[in-house]
Image (tube, rainbow, N blue to C red):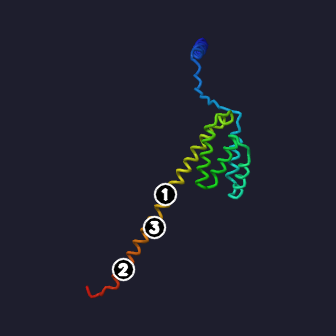
Amino acid sequence: MKNKILILASSLLLAACVAPAPEAPTTSIKLIHSASNIDELLSYNAQLRKMPPVELGRELQRINAYPASPSNTVRRAMALSLTRDPIDLAKAEAQLWNVMGDNSVEAEKLKPLVQVLVGHYSDLRRVADNAEKSSVQLKEAQRKVDQLNDKLEALKNIERSLPAGGK
């Protein structure tokens, strides 16, 4: 019995000496919440993306009647970017740059969203430019293929018209 008590006491003593396992390090992400209408603008953009072209044109006319403000400028840029017209996309990007240059309190709160949109729109313009260049190159290559096919057909016709006695 003495041995059992001694073993139990030793176990308790050893258990007390062991330090508790350190907690796993945790990282915290600090969320910055501003009192701007970024959530509203993101929701508005989602609604715009669902609109057919005719309705989008009407919405763009409505937006143009809104009073000038950074958030309305962002709304206008969002609508312009969805018209599938490269000129409108360039206008949208220019309008966003105007918001970036604005130092008003409202514009300052919108600048993170505007920076993302400017990057996105410039990427869209670059892709559209590359697609147009590729289209021009494809048309040129097709024209050359057609010319070579015409020449090949002309050579075949010449060969058919030659006398067969050469063999």
Q: Is residue 131 above or below residue 141?
A: above
Which quarter shows the C terminus?
bottom left
Give the farthest residue toward the left.
167
Q: Which residue is mark 3?
A: 142
Contact (Cβ within 8 Å) of mark 2 with mark 3: no
Q: Residues within 10 Å of mark 1 (few under 14, many from 20)?
A: few
Q: Residues within 10 Å of mark 3 (few under 14, many from 20)?
A: few
* Residue 8 left/right relative to 138: right
Three-letter amino acid code at disc 3?
Gln
Query: Where's residue 39, x and y in %?
Result: 70, 40
**Of 12 and 19, which appears nearest the observer?**
19
Contact (Cβ within 8 Å) of mark 2 with mark 1: no
**N-terminal label among 3 and 1:** 1
Which quarter shows the N terminus?
top right
**Of 8 and 44, which appears nearest the observer?**
44
* Residue 48 left/right relative to 166: right
Three-letter amino acid code at disc 2?
Lys
Q: Residues within 10 Å of mark 2 (few under 14, many from 20)?
A: few
**N-terminal label among 2 and 1:** 1
**N-terminal label among 2 and 3:** 3
Label of residue 84 in the image:
none
Q: Which residue is mark 1?
A: 133
Query: Where's residue 62, x and y in %?
Result: 74, 51
Q: CA distance from mark 2 to mark 3?
A: 21 Å
Q: CA distance from mark 3 to mark 1?
A: 14 Å
Three-letter amino acid code at disc 1?
Lys
Secondary structure category for the residue under label 1: helix
Label of residue 156 in the image:
2
Secondary structure category for the residue under label 2: helix
Query: Where's residue 2, x and y in %?
Result: 60, 11
**Of 7 and 107, which appears nearest the observer?**
107
